[in-house]
Amino acid sequence: MYVWGVPQKPGERGVAGARPHGWAPVRSGRLSEVVPPRRRTYPLRVEVNRLLDGRLKLRHLVLVDALSERGSIVGAAAHLHMSQPAATRVLQELETLLGLSLYERHPRGVSPTIFGTAFTEHARAVLAQVTSAGRHLNELANAELGTVTVGTHLAGSNMLLPRAIVAVKRRHPHVTVIVHEAMPEGLLVDLDSGRVDFIVGRLTTAVARPSTVQRTLYDEPITLVARRDHPALSLASATLADLVSYPWILPGPETVLRGELERAFIRNELSLPDNRVECTSILTVRQILAESDAIAALPMLIAYGDERITTLPVSLTPMSHTVGVTLPMERPTSPSTTVLLAQLQVVAEGMRRSMERSPVEVAAGDG
């Protein structure tokens, strides 16, 4: 029996004289008696030529992407529609080729080592380039047959993106637009791997990274929203303290907006409402608002896009969204992606001018 990471003494060998890389014999036969290693040794260098002589396959990169995202061999294998033994074999091939351990094995799955984290970043970049190359060639072969995949989360998904898509489809009916909605962290992974071409939504430091570039489109205030006949609308000079007793819909703890709301409650010496639902699905949020006394903090234009709900006269200043697009820094932009990006700029400019006059004009489509 061998245990990974326990250094061997010079000349020490295991069963049948074998010495697996990085493993050492367990003399007692009981894992619980093995002293955890104080250090782990790795090759001084990776043979770069091995990565270029044909032994490194795209299937290795695809598996690494899935493993780092799913966190287990079982999950990665299911996602890639392959058997678990096959996934294990592909991973072993790659680790043997590199001479490094990319993942730590745990009872509930795997987690990337420092080498696994670094290799995953490069694997996703390569996969994104291959995907982009194939699509670019298709679009060059037929300029009217292209596909653009855009990721979005809440901000910009209510008016900006739908209006830009409508305009693109009106001029280029055979261009396929795929909208992928997910949490910002997941969208960044998809952007790195080429599963989305760019992201439309709120620009924050969380999505500002060396591999991406951000373009600002407009600023949008955050407002408190409720149904049009909500009891709080009858209050004179209502404050945040007057609204705590109502049900609330809050974004998840992992979101930037949740952190800003928590700080707003702290500034007003208030605790978060006890009666609350945590939700980031705008369709669900809207329906709950329309059918209950719940209150939610949402980008201003979302309220103006639904006749069932309205804003409450309680200021959340200085809370606002900077809405824009996040793109990969070094990946070529396909023709269909360029078309949608240009239309987003046009629509955003009209919305920005209208918001300076009245948000109602934005909701009505003016500009």
Image: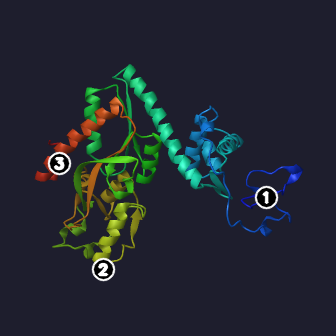
Badge 1 element: strand
Q: Residue at x 85, y 54 (%)?
A: 14
The mark that comes first in sequence, 1 or 3, is: 1
Task: Using the rendered image of the protein, determine whether residue 156 is visible from the camera's viewpoint.
Answer: no
Is 314 on the left or on the right of 79, as rendered? left
Badge 3 element: helix
User: Residue beneath label 1, please?
Assistant: 24
Is 118 on the left or on the right of 77, as rendered? left
Q: Amino acid at mark 3?
A: Arg
* In front of the other: 265 or 111: 111
Checking the image for residue 269, the label placed there is 2
The quadrant in which the N terminus is found is bottom right
Q: Residue furthest top?
A: 141
Residue 64 rendering spot, x and y as whole percentages: 58, 45
Q: Residue furthest bottom?
A: 269
Front position among marks 2 and 3: 3
Q: Amino acid at mark 1?
A: Ala
Q: CA distance from mark 1 to mark 3?
A: 65 Å
